[in-house]
Image (cartoon, helix red, strand yellow):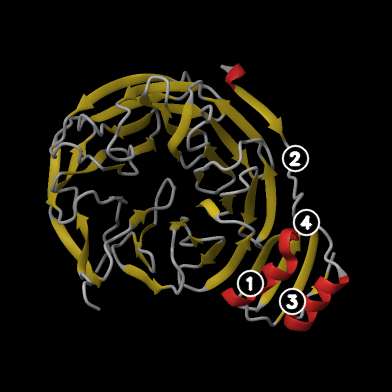
């Protein structure tokens, strides 16, 4: 019964992964993740980690301020990619 | 430590030609078995057992191929048919290969609600942000997201097909109109209303992603109802069962060449409900109720062998293997722990 089914969204949004920051050679411990979340606050979307190459991708909903990014760079080596 | 209990855990290989049994490697655990899962696959290659801190994987020859302890608390874990393991712990997911190497982890803004993993894609739903479902392409670990128009602050169970390009999600908890979603890795969302004032409790998906099996609580009746749903939205009602179940309904779904076989545990009435489905017409072509051995309220776990020939049900103090066609009890195995989850795969015998 087709009326029981509705296709209403055909777009991959990616809407919350708007800005990307990268850190290379990082040891991403739970404590480090908590620190990063604390700095990024409500803008935090996710932090991906590839432990074999120690690469971290930090995604945010909005661009981080110079102060926030400066702190992340100083402590954990993050820089803006896009 | 004082008060710790050691459990001896033994998997069994059962020869379906003479119904003899062989114990596979036993091991000692200090926590009771938490769960056992197999990949959603036509030809499942692995069985995985996990506790809150340990993950153990067997291959289809009965060999233990991975035994791994983790330092975090495992909330749940799933495995795909390549042996990639997806673990949920708080707001973080971890992906390991079959060697136990951590390949990828991702920490989200809020607790992860549920996870699913196919050979191509993994899926993640979040507890406090269910409108965004994340998809991880396992070929390069790129992440995308799908926006789904659902109520917030609900529980959204997830399962995905063998490849993982199709996932199913239901809405959960109270105060929800029962609905259910087919989600596709290309971003398509197909919402299906169940027509009940209730919520999806358990869901299953066939490896090809075309058929899903749902149990949902209908709060108006009240009852637990079950449907098979085709990906185009056509439903087949499978029955209405008692509402106040002591345990969550266990179901199993299998596909053979001509029909789909589904088995549902009774809960209140300790029956097994067999349904055979014609997926072209979405009609139930065979419906049968059987009463396997086991005590009241104890039909906790049920599974079908991947070829659909046998039902495996844990009831009372026994695990029972039942022939689908004849309902004949082929095998009974004494078990030590009540209310355990059981999963089966078809094993191959290694040539000497």
Q: Nearer the viewer, mark 2 or mark 3?
A: 3
Q: Nearer the viewer, mark 2 or mark 4?
A: 4
Dot 3 corresponds to which residue?
A: A23
Q: Residue B45: which quarter of the image? A: bottom left
Dot 3: what SS?
A: strand
The chain that hosts pointer 4 is A
Q: Position of residue B304 (x, y in %)?
A: 30, 41
Instruction: Measure the C-alpha gap from mark 2 to mark 3.
Output: 30 Å
Label 4 near label 2: C-beta < 8 Å? no
Residue at 53%, 39% in the rendered image = B168
Would you say B63 lies left or right of B3 here?
right
Residue at 61%, 59% in the rendered image = B138
Q: Nearer the viewer, mark 1 or mark 2?
A: 1
| Mark 2 / mark 3, whichever is N-terminal | 2
Instruction: Measure the C-alpha gap from mark 1 to mark 2.
Output: 30 Å
Dot 4 corresponds to which residue?
A: A61
Instruction: Measure the C-alpha gap from mark 2 to mark 4.
Output: 18 Å
Nearer to the camera, A3 or B309: A3
Q: Quadrant of the N terminus of chain B?
A: bottom left
Q: Residue furthest right?
A: A66
Q: Position of residue A5 (x, y in %)?
A: 60, 24
Instruction: Measure the C-alpha gap from mark 3 to mark 1.
Output: 13 Å
Dot 2 corresponds to which residue?
A: A11
Tag 3: Cα neighbours inside 10 Å, few (<14), some, or many (≥20)? Answer: many
Q: Is residue B114 visible?
A: yes
């Amino acid at each position: 019964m087709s009326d029981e089914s509705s296709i209403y969204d055909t777009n991959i949004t990616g809407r919350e992964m708007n800005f990307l920051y990268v850190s290379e050679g990082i040891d991403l411990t739970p404590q480090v993740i908590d620190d990063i979340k604390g700095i990024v606050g409500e803008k935090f979307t996710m932090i991906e980690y590839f432990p074999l190459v120690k690469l971290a991708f930090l995604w945010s909903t909005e661009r981080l301020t110079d102060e926030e990014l400066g702190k992340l760079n100083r402590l954990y080596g993050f820089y803006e990619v896009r | 430590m004082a008060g710790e209990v050691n459990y001896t855990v033994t998997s069994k290989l059962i020869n379906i030609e003479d119904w003899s049994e062989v114990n596979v490697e036993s091991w000692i655990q200090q926590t009771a078995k938490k769960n056992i899962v197999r990949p959603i696959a036509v030809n499942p290659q692995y069985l995985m057992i996990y506790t809150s801190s340990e993950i153990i994987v067997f291959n289809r020859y009965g060999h233990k191929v991975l035994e791994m302890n983790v330092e975090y608390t495992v909330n749940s874990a799933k495995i795909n048919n390549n042996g990639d393991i997806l673990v949920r712990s708080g707001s973080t997911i971890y992906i390991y290969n079959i060697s136990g190497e951590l390949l990828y982890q991702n920490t989200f803004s809020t607790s992860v609600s549920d996870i699913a993993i196919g050979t191509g894609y993994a899926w993640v739903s979040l507890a406090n942000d269910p409108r965004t479902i994340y998809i991880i392409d396992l070929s390069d670990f790129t992440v995308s997201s799908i926006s789904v128009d659902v109520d917030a602050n609900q529980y959204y169970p997830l399962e995905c097909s063998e490849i993982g390009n199709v996932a199913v999600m239901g809405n959960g908890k109270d105060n929800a109109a029962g609905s259910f979603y087919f989600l596709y890795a290309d971003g398509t969302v197909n919402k299906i209303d169940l027509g009940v004032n209730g919520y999806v409790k358990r869901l299953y998906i066939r490896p090809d992603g075309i058929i899903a099996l749902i149990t949902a609580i209908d709060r108006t009746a009240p009852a637990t109802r079950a449907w098979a749903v085709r990906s185009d939205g056509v439903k087949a009602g499978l029955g209405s069962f008692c509402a106040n179940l002591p345990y969550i309904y266990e179901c199993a779904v299998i596909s053979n060449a001509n029909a789909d076989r589904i088995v549902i545990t009774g809960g209140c009435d300790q029956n097994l409900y067999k349904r055979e489905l014609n997926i072209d017409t979405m009609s139930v072509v065979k419906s049968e109720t059987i009463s396997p051995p086991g005590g009241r309220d104890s039909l906790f776990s049920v599974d079908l062998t991947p070829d659909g020939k046998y039902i495996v049900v844990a009831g009372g103090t026994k695990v029972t293997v039942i022939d689908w066609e004849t309902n004949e009890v082929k095998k009974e195995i004494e078990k030590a722990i009540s209310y355990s989850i059981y999963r089966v795969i078809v094993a191959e015998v290694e040539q000497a």
